[in-house]
Amino acid sequence: ALLFRANYATAFRAPDMGYTFGGTSGFYTSGTDYYRCAVSEPGTPIADCTYNPVSIFGLHEGNHDLKSITAKSWGGGVVWSPTSDFNIKADYYHINISNEVQLQDLNTLLRTESACRLGQLDPASPTCIAALTQVVRAAADSPKPNVIQQVTVLPINVSRENVSGI
């Protein structure tokens, strides 16, 4: 006997409640201050920069703008059973997950903020507006000019993941 089968499914799941409604919580970490490296030590490789690493106070809070996580899957297979004691199966599956949620990468945020301050990215772009809001620095005329005072990292929807297999 020869049998063909196929399936298709779509699932939606809301992000974890903590990612959406979580209150503000603080943490300490370290990271590279790309902006101060570029301004205070131009030409110095990042690995040798005085501001790599620096201690950073960070904040994490929920994000009400998260989209639901979506998963779509489909698959198919064939079974050949020439006798009751012998059969061969082959299956194929494909899963497409979009809007997964993860915390922003601190290093990427600091690189983006630096590029915005240095004019390498358009400071009026939504990306720069967000980065410049999330990385708070001391004033340029303060006793410790341009020191990172705090960084806020948010949970965000990331693009897409596809998985297929036989």
Image (cartoon, rainbow, N blue to C red):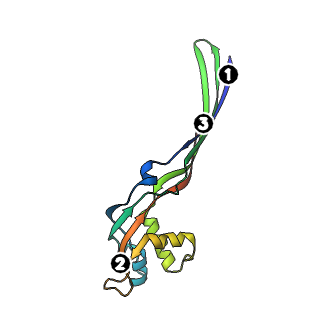
- Secondary structure at badge 3 equals strand
Task: Name the one closer to the observer, 52 or 13.
Answer: 13
Q: Position of residue 59 (x, y in %)?
A: 37, 63
- Crowd band around label 1 with a 10 angstrom C-alpha radius: few (<14), some (14–19), many (20+): few
Q: Residue at x 44, y 54 (%)?
A: 21
Q: Residue at x 61, y 28 (%)?
A: 90
Q: Position of residue 160 (x, y in %)?
A: 57, 51
Q: Residue at x 32, y 83 (%)?
A: 144
Q: Please give left or right for residue 66 compared with residue 149 in the image.
A: right
Q: Please give left or right for residue 137 compared with residue 119 in the image.
A: left
Which residue is under mark 1? 3
Q: Please give left or right for residue 115 compared with residue 73 in the image.
A: left
The image quadrant where one finds the C terminus is: top right
Which residue is under mark 3? 93
Q: Amino acid at mark 2?
A: Val
Up-down relation of residue 137 to residue 90 (above or below): below
Which residue is under mark 2? 147
Chain-order first, disc 1 or disc 3: 1
